Amino acid sequence: MYQSIDSHPEPPLSHCRIVVFSIIALSLLIFSIYGNSFDCSWHFDDDPNITDNPNLHLKEITWQNLKRALFSDRNNPAYPYRPMACLTFALNHYFGGLNVFGYHLVNILIHLISSVFLFLFIYHTLNLASLKAKYARQSYFIALLATTLWAINPVQTQAVTYIVQRMASLAGMFYIMSMFFYLKARRSETGSKKIIFFILCFVSFLMALGSKENAAILPLSLFLYEIVILQEDAGSYLRRNRGVFLIVCGGTLLLGLLYMYFKGGNIFSFLNGYENRPFTLTQRLLTQPRVTIFYFSLLLYPVPNRLSIAHSFQVSTSLFDPISTIFSILLISGAIAFAIYSAKKNPLFSFCILFFFLNHAIESSILPLELIFEHRNYIPSMLFFLPIAIGFYNLLQLYTKKKAMKHIISAFIILLLIGVGHATFMRNFTWKNERNLWMDAIEKSPDLFRPHHNLGKYYHDHGHKNEAILEYQKAIEKPVTNRIDETSVTYYNLAKIYSDFKDYEKALYHYYKALFINPQFPPIYNDIAGVFDRQGKYELAYRYLVEAFRLWPYSTVTNFNLGLYYLRERQPEKALYHLQSLSDEKEFGDKVLIYLGVAFKQKGQLGRAVTYFKKALKANPRNIKLYLHLAEIFYRIGDNQHARRQAAKAIDLIPDKAAFRRILDDLQKRGPLKNLQPQAAIVVPLMRECCRSKSETLKEWNELLNEKSLKFEGE
């Protein structure tokens, strides 16, 4: 690779061999470094976006199911939510369920493809007519080194190993593909090739935008590339194409405004998000320059103790508090001014600086997002290491005749790659499970609320409830939160634990604390209803369910519970309104089918009731109550033979006398629960007949029936 610096005016390898070798080299590097991430567990935002999102749990490839995946935002199903990324999640689920291996494999392949196109983009840029004289001899070395430094940097683990952040990496993949196709279109000599590459550029842009919204900045990046890199006289080009410039800027702005309008109902809807943030719009704008400088330093010095899923970052309250605020603003302003000033003399260096800051613009400006996340560097850092790679090349060229120095620099580059790659490999171990991830975050940012809460959730999910209580209590005591109402979830989770302990007084106390902090959180109302239901306070439970439904009419759990309430009250029409939309939901097993059967039975539509009971039997053929429901229906339509046959099947499934007693006790229940059971006055005599016909083996059960029979006679 270095030989060409001394003697070869052109790269010694053909273009085809260069591309093939680069793909092989990048594949080996990336799979070696990320090979220990295939079993890393689900984390944090993976749950609401993937594991707990039934819209992405694709079981059958149909247009309806694919459409659900594209519109997978459960809070706003009328609006497509990052459809390209969500479609890939749905396909992952189709082929492998929730097994993390397939998701990680796709994430790594996306990162590899991004790396390959980044290499191609840099390589072809360095071989442009305006840059060829300066860089062409070592364009291969520079492009491969710059790409490798980007691809193996530990900062990228949050976009690659963290499954849900496929949204960021997929957007990055299509983003750099679009830039490469734009470059190919501009270099094509024939009109047909230009058209094909421009179409590919536009399609890639749409796919990037459909993966994550920050890709909306791509037209500005392309325009910047045009005026800084492709045009010899940027000023003259801008004067001649002011209209194009305005169209690009206006189009990008229009995209943002349309997104705000459709997402929130008006173009200023993003301001509403600041109501729940511990900072104002002004404070965020003041803080982000410091965050951007931190990102810059993190890419240069990504040691493990500086990386975390949750960074504690002081909010800037003025230009001088903290004092680093004004210095960060001046530093960024100076860097941008210098890049613009030196664009004619050193266009490549200027473009890399402007590209970095431009692509941080969306997530580091007015939107009420959290202050800092490492995955936000995925696109902005794509050209970050190009000036560094050029610097290494210049050093090697400077010491061409000093073999020892050249070997020292070469060894340093190799050791740097080994060190950075090893840091990424080790960082993946932190992502192995939730416990590792959040304990690491607690160690680095002990004043943050979120790590303690999520460590508590890990313990909670794994049945270590006492440890969960301790971590939840620590979380409540921490001063730094990402949302004003964030602690409501902690109180809510504590309430769930106390409810599991059947300490309903403490459960309700914590539920009401959660409700006071965030009265717009529907699951709280649903769970309070559950506590009142277990206490037999059905009317109170119903009031809270109605409120939960008002706040979140798409909640499957709330619809299920309301349907169940109306069945108990013998209001089958209302029950069907809530239950029919849940017939395909897997989270309730066969319960929805059973309750739909009960609803149609209450309505007197016995044929439809039989249909649902039989569907439920296919899902659970050992459900004794289903056979009793069918026995009751066949008896009511006068088919005594089938009624006795269903009762006999139920008897055959009962394992012992104790189980039989429990079934009879359920049939004997009074109050609203009675309306969910088979009609005892019909099924008990049928069971008695079956027990008598089965001779001596069921004498004890027959005696039990005789003992209970008088209680059912009046029904």
Image (cartoon, rainbow, N blue to C red):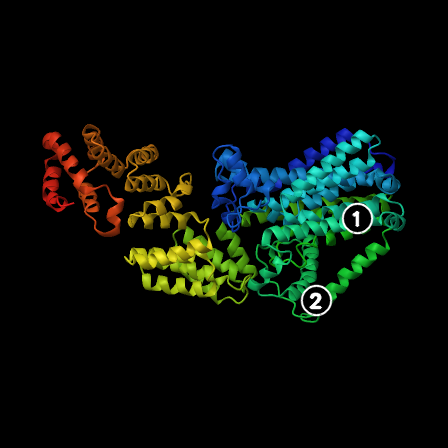
Using the numbered discs, state the Cα–Cα distance from disc 2 to disc 1 in whole angstroms: 27 Å
**Residue 85: x and y, percent?**
59, 42
Q: Which of these two is toward me, 596 or 666?
A: 596
* Residue visible at 87% across and 49% down in the picture: 234
Q: Quadrant of the C terminus?
A: top left
For marks 2 and 1, the one nearer the N-term is 1
Q: Amino acid at mark 1?
A: Leu
Q: Is residue 148 left or right of residue 466?
A: right
**Snapshot quadrant of residue 7:** top right
**Residue nearest the viewer, comparing 27 with 268:** 268
Residue 13, compared with residue 134, is above or below; it is above
Crowd band around label 1 with a 10 angstrom C-alpha radius: few (<14), some (14–19), many (20+) = some
What residue type is disc 2 on? Thr
Dividing the picture into quarters, in which one does residue 641 lie?
Answer: top left
Residue 457 rendering spot, x and y as whole percentages? 45, 55
Residue 224, numbered label: 1
Q: Where is mark 2, residue-wise?
A: 325
Residue 394 visible in the displayed image:
no
Q: Secondary structure at mark 2?
A: helix
Position of residue 71 measured from the top left corner of the image (x, y, whole percent):
55, 43
As rendered, which of 607 and 431 lies closer to the eye?
A: 607
Asked whether the viewer can see residue 62, the reply is: yes
Q: Secondary structure at mark 1?
A: helix
Q: Image check: 461 left or right of 232?
A: left
Given residues 300 and 61, the one toward you in this image is: 61
Q: Quadrant of residue 709?
A: top left
Q: Is residue 698 left or right of residue 46?
A: left
Q: Nearer the viewer, mark 2 or mark 1?
A: 1
Q: Are marks 2 and 1 in contact (CB under 8 Å)?
A: no
Where residue 141 sits in the image (x, y, percent)? 78, 39
How many numbered discs?
A: 2
